[in-house]
Image: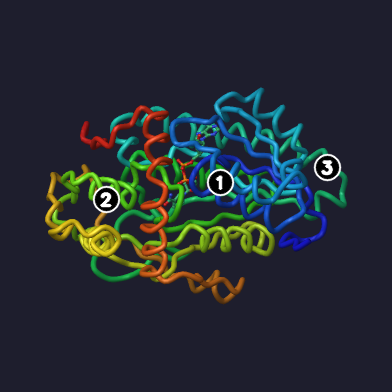
């Protein structure tokens, strides 16, 4: 069987493994490694295990035996410590976070709890675990903290974020992610915890929770509802297909230099307007509706404090670790739209369970 992990990594703890990126990572680990995967998640509104169940149906009993769900809220220090003890990991990949900027505008408290206190509790538990490991396991141990490019703030028309860019978070979400990055670095410098960080740009792909831009547009268009475009539509994001992010995460976790951070982005800069229009054009081909779906695009008031532009310079991870994205934005978007078109029942179920009907969030500033 294929094993993408180095020898010695036989137990991996993934936090947030029921979320969009975490579940893509868990699926990859179950498919392409032989390690046990401990999936720690509080199972919040954004969680969904059906993509993992789907993968396990294909992979069978051997993989099923290697996957263990630990339903734990990182805000509970004691439960977090017990979960880390139970997982007894060689590698921790920390993705659990409240992740939606719009929700952070309406309710910032949950972001401070999960992203700051939750990370603190995890660091304390992992530190205790690390300090009690035998020397041969300690030497290969790592905690990989997964973060966002949003910690760097907003760019003008030029320039790109790199590992040297100073932090300048502007939203409650990015401020709490920045705080978690600082905590992880502090636990490295102060307590000697071996850590690696990555800061990635906007992800998209199958199984993404239906409040994020790309699924919102697909679902609104297919329902012939107005497709909201924030502000003038000129805000730029650097889009990356989720499986390309997972490739980068595994490289950084296994081969990244301890104490280092890596910026991850796939040269996928597009304005929101271009993204929305491209999705409409793809849907015109999949489900012609007499008149173009672009007719539904409706400008709405901008997000409060909306960062204008994000763009990543991925030179370091490309040259040092050999990472490059396998999907162009056009190919990745086409396959995501096609996937969504064929999984409308999944979106209905997820929306119902989360009590989210497609309404706009993030206007309470
Ligand atoms: P997501 O919201 O889809 O999933 C996050 C998961 O974390 C959910 O299953 C949730 O239940 C879990 N979680 C949240 N708080 C928790 C807590 N206190 N205890 C236990 N579990 C908790 O998010 P995502 O899009 O998969 O993002 C994963 C990580 O990647 C986040 O840290 C995010 O900041 C980072 N990131 C995301 C993107 C993106 O475009 N989505 C880009 C760069 C970085």
Q: Which residue is mark 2?
A: 217
Foreground: 133 or 189? 133
Is 10 left, or right, of 193 in this rendering? right
Q: Which residue is mark 3?
A: 133
User: Are the residues at dot 3 and dot 2 in contact (C-beta closer than 8 Å)?
Assistant: no
User: Are the residues at dot 1 and dot 3 in contact (C-beta closer than 8 Å)?
Assistant: no
For image coordinates 19% across by 48% down, the residue present is 227
Check disc 2 and report its element: helix, strand or loop.
Answer: helix
Is 96 left, or right, of 189 in this rendering? left
Q: Is the residue indicated by label 1 positioned so its CB lies within 8 Å of ligand 1?
A: yes
Check disc 1 and report its element: helix, strand or loop.
Answer: helix
User: Which numbered mark, 3 or 2, is in the foreground of this view?
Assistant: 2
Question: Badge 3 local density, few (<14 within 10 Å), some, or many (20+)?
Answer: some
Check disc 3 and report its element: helix, strand or loop.
Answer: loop
| Dot 3 or dot 2, earlier in sequence | 3
For image coordinates 32% across by 70% down, the residue present is 159
Q: Which picture quadrant has residue 95?
A: top right
| Dot 2 or dot 1, earlier in sequence | 1
Question: Badge 2 local density, few (<14 within 10 Å), some, or many (20+)?
Answer: many
Percent position of residue 221, x then y: 23, 50
Q: Which residue is mark 1?
A: 23
| Dot 1 or dot 3, earlier in sequence | 1
The N terminus - image quarter? bottom right
Foreground: 79 or 123? 79
Relative to 64, is 249 above or below? below
């Amino acid at each position: 069987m294929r094993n993408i992990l180095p020898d010695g990594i036989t137990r991996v703890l993934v936090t947030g493994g029921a979320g969009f990126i975490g579940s893509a990572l868990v699926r990859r680990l179950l498919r392409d490694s032989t390690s046990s995967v401990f999936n720690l998640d509080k199972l919040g509104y954004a969680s969904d295990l059906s993509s993992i169940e789907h993968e396990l149906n294909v992979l069978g009993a051997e993989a099923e035996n290697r996957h263990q769900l630990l339903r734990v809220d990182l805000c509970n220090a004691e439960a977090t410590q017990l979960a880390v003890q139970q997982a007894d990991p060689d590698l921790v990949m920390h993705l659990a976070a409240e992740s939606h900027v719009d929700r952070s505008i309406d309710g910032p408290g949950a972001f401070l709890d999960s992203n700051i206190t939750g990370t603190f509790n995890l660091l304390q538990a992992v530190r205790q675990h690390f300090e009690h490991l035998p020397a041969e396991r300690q030497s290969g141990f790592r905690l990989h903290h997964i973060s966002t490019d949003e910690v760097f703030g907003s760019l003008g028309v030029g320039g790109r974020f790199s590992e040297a860019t100073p932090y300048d978070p502007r939203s409650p979400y990015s401020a709490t992610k920045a705080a978690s990055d600082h905590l992880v670095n502090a636990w490295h410098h102060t307590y000697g915890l071996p850590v690696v960080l990555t800061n990635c740009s906007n992800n998209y792909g199958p199984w993404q929770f239906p409040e994020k831009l790309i699924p919102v547009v697909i679902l609104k268009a297919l329902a012939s509802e107005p497709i909201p475009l924030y502000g003038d539509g000129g805000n730029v994001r650097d889009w990356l297909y989720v499986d390309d992010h997972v490739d980068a995460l595994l490289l950084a976790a296994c081969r990244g230099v301890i104490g280092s951070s890596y910026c991850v982005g796939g040269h996928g800069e597009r304005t929101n307007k271009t993204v929305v229009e491209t999705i409409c054009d793809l849907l015109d081909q999949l489900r012609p509706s007499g008149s173009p779906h672009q007719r539904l695009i409706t400008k709405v008031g901008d997000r409060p404090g909306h960062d204008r532009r994000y763009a990543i310079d991925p030179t370091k991870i490309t040259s040092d670790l050999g990472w490059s994205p396998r999907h162009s934005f056009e190919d990745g978007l086409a396959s995501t739209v096609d996937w969504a078109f064929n999984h409308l029942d999944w979106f209905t179920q997820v929306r119902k369970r989360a009590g989210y009907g497609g309404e706009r969030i993030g206007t309470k500033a």
